[in-house]
Image (spheres, helix red, strand yellow):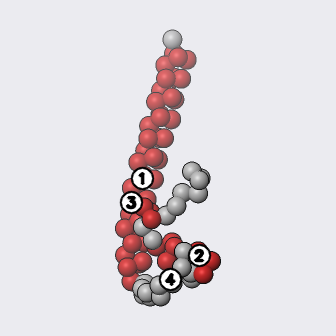
Amino acid sequence: MKPKLNKLITLLLLLGTFAFLMEAEERLAVVAHKELSKWASLLPVKEQPQVNTINPYAQSVSILEVILSEPSKKVNSANN
């Protein structure tokens, strides 16, 4: 009976540790997102001139603009 109890306690400790780490990772992600948003809001915003063409290669796009764009505007290439 005792070895089964030890295994159960070990399993519960492992599950508790995993749950703790998952919660800590989530909280850290939220804090990091807030801090990065604050830093990103301090970056200068430069308006890009509009190009009257649908050719994507004729339009200039900055990497910073792509990174800071809203997630809803990004195209998920995995689904295409």
N-terminal-most mark, 4 or 1: 1
Which of labels 1 and 2 is toward the front? 2
Most extreme residue toward the front, as rendered? 53
Q: CA distance from mark 3 to mark 1?
A: 6 Å
Q: CA distance from mark 2 to mark 4?
A: 9 Å
Tag 3 near tag 1, CB within 8 Å: yes
Q: What amino acid is found at the position of numbered circle 2 in the picture?
A: Asn
N-terminal-most mark, 4 or 3: 3
Q: What amino acid is found at the position of numbered circle 4 in the picture?
A: Asn
Point out which mark residue 52 bears.
4
Q: CA distance from mark 2 to mark 3?
A: 38 Å
Q: Position of residue 3 (x, y in %)?
A: 55, 17
Determine the residue positioned at 49% across, 23% down: 8
Which of 18/70 is in front? Answer: 70
**SS type, badge 2:** loop
Tag 1 near tag 2, CB within 8 Å: no
Would residue 79 be found to the left or right of residue 17 on screen?
A: right
Q: Position of residue 72 (x, y in %)?
A: 42, 61
Query: Which residue was labeled with disc 1?
Result: 26
Q: CA distance from mark 4 to mark 1?
A: 43 Å
N-terminal-most mark, 1 or 2: 1
**SS type, badge 4:** loop
Q: Residues within 10 Å of mark 1 (few under 14, many from 20)?
A: few
